Image (cartoon, rainbow, N blue to C red):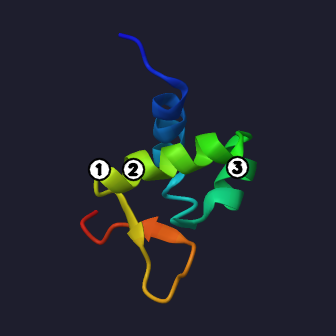
Amino acid sequence: MEFDKATVVSMRLFESLPHNPILDVTHTMKLLNVSRPTAGKAIKVLSELGILGKGEGLSSMVSMSTLM
């Protein structure tokens, strides 16, 4: 099975969520040592899956979904 970079980074981001439940693109870039576009795509993938969502009162940050 072939994975693109965003998918692999999304899996790495998912694995880091228990220790980093609230994050933004800049934090994700530093955490996973990736570029801004790659970090944004990883967050988008997890958001589209319902794993991440906007936190209350957080303008540019996302947090783990309350579904988890």
Amino acid type, label 2: Leu
Q: Cβ–Cβ below 8 Å for labels 2 and 1?
A: yes
Label 2 to label 3: alpha-carbon separation:
15 Å
Element under label 3?
A: helix
> The residue tagged with tag 1: helix, strand or loop?
loop
Q: Secondary structure at mark 2?
A: helix
Which of the labelled discs sits on residue 29, or is there none?
A: 3
Q: In the picture provided, is 9 more to the left or to the right than 65? A: right
Relative vertical location of residue 58 with respect to residue 27 in this rendering, above or below:
below
Quick check: 8 left or right of 24?
left
Which numbered dot is residue 49? 1
- Residue shown at the point (29%, 50%) measured from the top left: 49
Instruction: Give the residue at x 57% y 73%.
Output: 60
Is disc 1 surrounded by few (<14), some (14 to 19) or many (20+) residues within 10 Å? few
Q: On screen, 6 above or below 44?
A: above
Residue type for callout 1: Leu
Residue linked to disc 2: 46
Residue drawn at (55%, 81%) of the image: 59
Of the residues under marks 3 and 1, which one precedes in the sequence?
3
**Mark-to-mark CA distance, 2 and 1:** 5 Å
Give the mark nearer the N terminus: 2 vs 3: 3
Within 10 angstroms of label 2, few (less than 14), some, or many (20 or more) residues?
A: some
Q: Position of residue 1 (x, y in %)?
A: 35, 10
Percent x, y for residue 52? Answer: 39, 61
Q: Quadrant of residue 20?
A: bottom right
Q: Amino acid at mark 3?
A: Met
Quadrant where the C terminus sits is: bottom left
Count of labels in the image: 3
